[in-house]
Every structure is written in structure tokens, then in C-alpha cells.
Amino acid sequence: MFRCAFLILFLALGNELHLSHGTEVSVNNTENKLCLYANLMVNFSVTYEVGVNKNETVIFVLPENVTTEGSTCDNTTSTLKLSFGHGHSWTVEFTKKNKTYQVDTIVFSYNLNDSSVFPNSTSKETKFVTVKSIITNVSVDTYYSCKSENVLTVESVIQTLYDVALQAFVINGSKSDTDTVCSADMTSTTVAPTTTVTSTAAPTSTPTLPTPTTGKYSIAPDVNSTACLMATFGLQIGYKQGDKEETINLVPNITEVGGACGANSSDLILTSDTITIMFTFSNDGKKFHLHALKVTVKPATGDPVIAVNNNMSIWAAAVGSSYMCNKEQTLNVTDTLTLYTFELRVQPFEVNKGEFATAHECSLDDTSILIPIIVGAALAGLILIVVIAYVIGRRKTYVGYQTL
């Protein structure tokens, strides 16, 4: 048996998208030496059934009080198991090969019989969700470090990892001071070598791309339910890579759709080979809006480009209606990345029968504001004609009465 010791560190954060606590855990082996270490934050979003064709979404965090019972350390495999609440657990499986190690899978189990987390759930079973991790090629005797968000989506469950520090196969019982940094964290500091020249290098000026194809995207709680979130749009992304400006289109027929619907917050996640984009919508009971965007672009060469904006307030409309903008819109996510949308229509809440509700049109589409302008211009023209006619008439009258 392994003897496990753990330390929990609570960090209160004000950002409403990062509600999780910082959880620091250490696992000791039979010699009472550190063999596994973790310090990370995890948010969970789970959609579950509460009635016939009715679902709810809850958002909760990896809490302060966890246990490490069931965690194990070996020469080539290790397991970190964090149990919490009434029958919930989060398990990370590590494997080592030669001079590197990696996370093979992450298994999240949640107990729908826990009414404190899943009120009014029609199911009382414990469900398991297994996802493949992108944590690979971590050098032995270093810890994996990633401040950026890593969103893992399977069916009705979204796991968001960030501020992650993990080390398995600890040598001599001491956590390493050297880290293996994830690629997402290196994008802002990595500079391409100036001496590297390839024949396929993109020109400094951005080539003009065709208008992107309009895609239709929707999320349903399960295969037997109608959509709870709907969106249609064409999407083009402009981004800076070094001193170059590039553009790329999102191609609908090779894009996977994920996300979750909630009472006050809904997510739409679109993933292709080169683009991952997460839209987060919020509502206050009366109106909804696009609250946050996270965009990741994987160029053919160089490191991924990541842009995050958690303080947006656009695409606003009344809850129960949709937002529409057929004209091209430009959204500056950050200084280095811009979204261009075409033929946009979204409804992230209260979708009925899989159809868009009445749309609130953007100002670019609203032609009603042109009517007062046209009428005003016509009146101004009419007044000008009357004035000119009056002046001409006065001059003729004056000439007719001139003294001989």
C-alpha cells in the first residue's frame, strides 16, 4: 500500500470564468518520499436530464476537500486519483517511456444521485467520462506547466484545465524546479529565427481569401432531444504570426461541434484540424450576449496562436429570441487576432422545436434608420427647389416693374 499525503491550497479568484480553487496535492510512496505532485485548477460543466426532453447544466469546480486514496506510483505507470463530494472522482493516468512521460487518459466520474450537485436528476447512476490528454513528451525530472486553458469535451461534459503543474515519476523524492512548458504558453514569447527561409513561406501581404462558407451548428442535450443552442455563420480569422498577417477560414464540413447548454451560461465549441474556437454566452434572465471567446489557430509552421477575451458584451438580444447580422462583422478579440463573421444568426437559450425565434437585427442590417434620412433628404431637396423658384420669381417681378 502506498501512503498518501496531500495539501490543499485555496486560491480565491475574481474572474467569473475561472471559479476553480487551486488544488495542490502530493502523493508519497512506501518510503514516504514524494512520487507524484499536482497543483492545478479544474472547472466542470455537466448537462444532465431532469425530465422528459428537459435538461439542466451545472458548473462546479475541483473542490478544496479531496482525498488521494487509490493513487499509485510505479516505475513506468502512475495514477493520480482525486475523490471529492459524494461519489465523484477525477483520475489521471501517467505512463513513462525512456526519458519522457505523458498523461494517457483523464477519467472523470460523477454521481447523479448527489442532489447537492445534480438537483432533480432523473438518473441516480454514476457516470464515467474518459478523454485523451494532450499532455505528452514531458521530460523526466521536470514538471509539466501550462497556464493556458485546455478544454476537454466529451458528450455532455466539459472539463477546463488551467494553471496546471504536474509531475509524475519524481526522482529522489524532490519536486523538480525545471518545467516542460506547454506550447500554448510559449506562443507569446517564441520568436521565429530570422535566418530560417523556406520556399513555402507566406508573403508579407495577406492573400485575399474567398468569403467563408456559412455553417450550421447546433447542440442538443442528447440524441433524442432537439437543439438547445443554434448558430449559423461563416467565419474568417485574421491573426499575426511574427511580423506577418495571415487569414484562415473555418470550413464547416470538417468542423466538429461541442459544447453545453445551461440556464445562465452556454458554450459552443467548434474544432477543426487547424482551428478551435469556444464561444461562451451569458444571460441575466432578460437578455443574452456573447461574454467570452477563446480562439486557437494551428498554423502549418510555427507555434499555435491563442487569443482569449473574457470581457465581451456583443451579439445581445432578448432571451427567447435570436441575434442576426447578415453583413460582415469585425470582432477584435485581441491585438493579434480578429474574427470576421458573415450571415450570422445565433440563439444560445430557449430554443423551441429546433427553430430560430424572432431575430434582433444588428445595426448594419437595420434599414429602418435609412427611412428618416431619405425623407429628410427629400424634404431638404424640396425646400431648396421652392427657395430657388421663389428667388427666380422675385427677380422676374422686379424686372417687370422697373421705371423707364
Image (cartoon, rainbow, N blue to C red):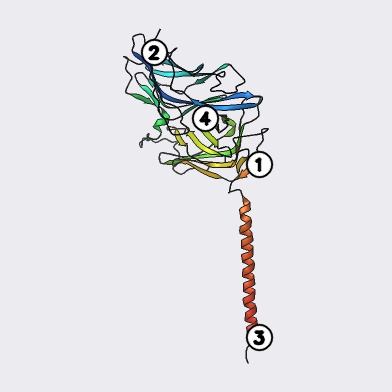
Tell me which amino acid carries mark 3: Gly
The spot of residue 201 in percent (x, y) is 44, 37
Question: Which of labels 4 and 2 is toward the front?
Answer: 2
* Rendered position, 296 above or below 121: below
How far apart, in angstroms, are the residues tagged by discs 4 and 2? Answer: 40 Å
- State the residue position of label 1: 358
Circles 2, 3 touching at the beta carbon (< 8 Å): no
How far apart, in angstroms, are the residues tagged by discs 2 and 1? Answer: 57 Å
Q: Residue at x 63, y 52 (%)?
A: 368
The spot of residue 322 in percent (x, y) is 62, 40
Tell me which amino acid carries mark 1: Thr
Q: Residues within 10 Å of mark 2 (few under 14, many from 20)?
A: many
How far apart, in angstroms, are the residues tagged by discs 3 and 4? Answer: 85 Å
Question: Which of labels 3 and 4 is toward the front?
Answer: 3
Q: Nearer the viewer, residue 171 or 137?
A: 171
SS at badge 3: helix
Q: Which mark is residue 400?
A: 3
Question: Which of labels 2 and 3 is toward the front?
Answer: 2
Residue 332 visible (yes or no) = yes
Q: Nearer the viewer, residue 103 or 317?
A: 317
* Rendered position, 140 above or below 252: above
- State the residue position of label 4: 273
Question: Which of labels 3 and 1 is toward the front?
Answer: 1
